[in-house]
Image (spheres, rainbow, N blue to C red):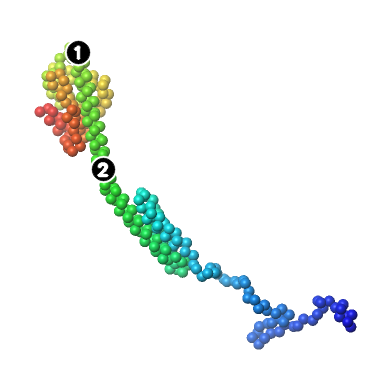
Amino acid sequence: MDEMNQNQSPYDRDFAEPYTSQDNTTFDPNYPESSEPSSYSYDAGYAAPADGKKPAGFGIAALIFGILSILLICIPIVPIITAIISIILGAVGMKKASEGTAGGKGMAIAGLIMGILCEIGGLVSALLGGAILIPSMMGYTKKSMQSSINSTAKTIYDSASTVLVEMDSEGITLPDYAVVCSDSNAEYGTTSFDADNFKERMQLYFSDLPNYEYYIVITDGYVEEAGCCEQGKDNVVGRYPDLITTDNDESFYDIYSDALY
């Protein structure tokens, strides 16, 4: 008998039959339930983070861009862009927090508020800057145009003076008083003076002369005054040697009439 027990395989032992309790739960005595809880669990949806906190990415990002908008407020354009990003992220963060799918609602609100304030501040600054800068630029442009046309008047004055010297050296009689103009019909005192020859010679020294309306006052064989404006722009006039300033609103006809009479 002992020999038979020694030769018996451990796999030949009898196993107890599983049984069912009154609540229809089946137990198998051969495989007792573990007293240790299972470390794995299954759920049909996404499990919440282990610490119970919800993601707050949008709220954090909104707060960061809101702070950047404030720090970069002195830099043109940049704070307006960061403020817009802060507003968008803040609005999305608030919506997700209200739906319960994200946290950081307070940070989202703070970022949204900072973005709105910086956006308003940036727009106000841009408007104020434009109100100051635009008139300054217009004033600078007007001064530049006035300086340029006065310089052209001086060029006409110098060219006319050079031609008169040439004509005098050639023995041509110069007028005691004459007004030579781009419009021959508006000339005065040129009956005994070849004004056309005079203007042709001037173009040798100033080739752009045909592009301007001009007058030249000649007294005792010398150029007394020259005035001009670009063709079709008689509201911006130049004169030499009595220069015209930007606060002068005279037209070309006005200064021509003053020179004539």
Q: Residue at x 49, y 65 (%)?
A: 55
Q: Residue at x 41, y 66 (%)?
A: 106
> In front: mark 1 or mark 2?
2
The residue carrying pointer 2 sits among few (fewer than 14), some (14 to 19) or many (20 or more) residues within 10 Å by Cα, namely: few
Image coordinates of residue 85 in percent, x first then y, are 41, 56
Query: In which quarter of the view is residue 44 placed?
Result: bottom right
Q: Please, what is the three-letter code of the amino acid marked with disc 2?
A: Ser
Check the image and name the residue furthest to the bottom: 22
- Work out whether 205 lies above or below 238: above
Find residue 119 and name its label.
none
Find residue 136 and name its label.
2
Find residue 169 and name its label.
1
Q: Nearer the viewer, residue 173 or 61?
A: 61
Query: In which quarter of the view is residue 208 placed?
Result: top left
Q: CA distance from mark 1 to mark 2?
A: 50 Å
Q: Residue at x 34, y 58 (%)?
A: 117
The residue carrying pointer 1 sits among few (fewer than 14), some (14 to 19) or many (20 or more) residues within 10 Å by Cα, namely: few
Q: Nearer the viewer, residue 29 or 73?
A: 73
Q: Is residue 187 left or right of residue 63?
A: left
Question: Which is nearer the N-term, disc 1 or disc 2?
Answer: 2
- Work out whether 18 lies above or below 225: below
Image coordinates of residue 119 in percent, x first then y, are 35, 56
> Is there a contact, CB below 8 Å, between mark 1 and mark 2?
no
Q: Please, what is the three-letter code of the amino acid marked with disc 1?
A: Ser
Q: Is residue 213 visible?
A: no
- Work out whether 120 lies above or below 196: below
Check the image and name the residue furthest to the left: 261
Q: Is residue 76 left or right of residue 219?
A: right
Task: Label 1: state its secondary structure.
Answer: helix
